Amino acid sequence: MTFRLPACLAAFTAVLLVAGTPASAAPQQRGFAPSEEVDWYFASTFGTGVYRVGDHTVSVVRLPFEIGLRTPDDDRWGVRLKLPVTAGFHSLSDAFEDVVHRNVATLAFLPGIELEKEVAPNWWLKPAASFGMAQDLVGGSHSTLYEIGVRSLWSRSFERMDFSLGNALLYAGNVAQDGLSQHLGVFSTGLNIIGPARGVLLDRAANIGVHLVHYAYFNRVDFLLDQTSRRSVDQQYEIALTVGTYRPIDILGFEVQRIGLGVRFGEGLLALRLVTGFLY
């Protein structure tokens, strides 16, 4: 049994979501509690960051802990226990400075099981299911979170370049204590390219990578603009540039192989985030 934080650690991801008022945002005829201004599922899976929707700011810190229960081989599937913990902080004027001085406003825990196997040469499948809870520590409300689906990763080297094609098909969402719910299907496709860089990084051969990802939501994702209206999104894109090494670097006991800046955008939303690996 092994315990580690994965190389795609998102605990230092910086996110800024800026939303205007879309024509398709249907007004709601009721007020919302502060905890409802976080899309629980989106925050729990997208990663650590600072979300700004209208005048409201929410900071989220996500720690994707996991335990490897069984290593995959030719005859059996690998098994991994996923134990991500997400903490949210509301209305911070300077999220990165104030986060250590404010009480945690929300907590979410979305444990799950992920299987992994190489089903064909260079092609890996990763079916998974997760179920958990999110709790508003200020208002006392809570929400049930869930996700089920499969991820696919195909990789191939050509000359000195490494190419990876990833896909994910997920059904997920959250059900709030008062019955307000959001269920969504997500299909994403990503391309990752890594090539050698001149020089070394921490005594390891260095490389440069870029990835492009498209996210399509079968039903629109809602973000609250204010106490009475929402913004809906049905497509997003991400482009990221990374630098890394061909052998992992051990930092405080965690294996990190690459680091870079990603830009996620679409439907008037913009996200800037630090990435440490491909999403699949």
Image: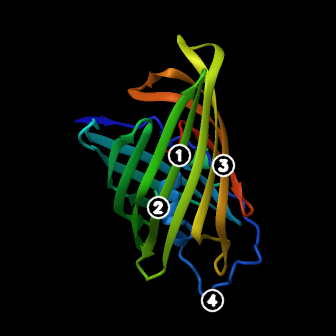
Front disc: 1 or 2: 1
The answer to whether mark 1 and mark 4 are in CB contact below 8 A is no
Residue 247 x/y as whole percent: 47, 20
The disc, 4 or 2, on the residue closer to the chain's N-terminal end is 4
- Circle 3 packing at 10 Å, graded few (<14), some (14-19), many (20+), is some
Q: Which residue is mark 2?
A: 170
- In this view, 22 is above or below 235: below
Would you say residue 202 is visible in this rendering?
Answer: no
Residue 75 location, x and y as percent? 23, 39
Give the residue at mark 3. 238
Q: Separation of disc 3 and disc 4 at Cα?
A: 34 Å
Say which residue label 4 marks.
29
- Residue drawn at x 39%, y 62% is 148
- As shown in the figure, which amino acid type bears the numbered disc 2? Leu
Q: Nearer the viewer, mark 4 or mark 2?
A: 2
Residue 252 seen = yes
In the image, farthest residue toward the bottom = 29
Mark identifier at residue 96: none
Which residue sits at x=65%, y=18%? Answer: 197
In the rendering, which numbered label is found on residue 166? 1
> Of helix, strand and loop, which one carries label 4?
loop
* Three-letter code for the amino acid on which mark 4 is drawn: Gln
Q: CA distance from mark 3 to mark 1?
A: 13 Å
Q: Height in image: 267 above or below 243? A: below
Of labels 3 and 2, the one closer to you:
2
In-front residue for pair 161/107 = 161
- Residues tagged 4 and 2 counted as in contact (Cβ below 8 A): no
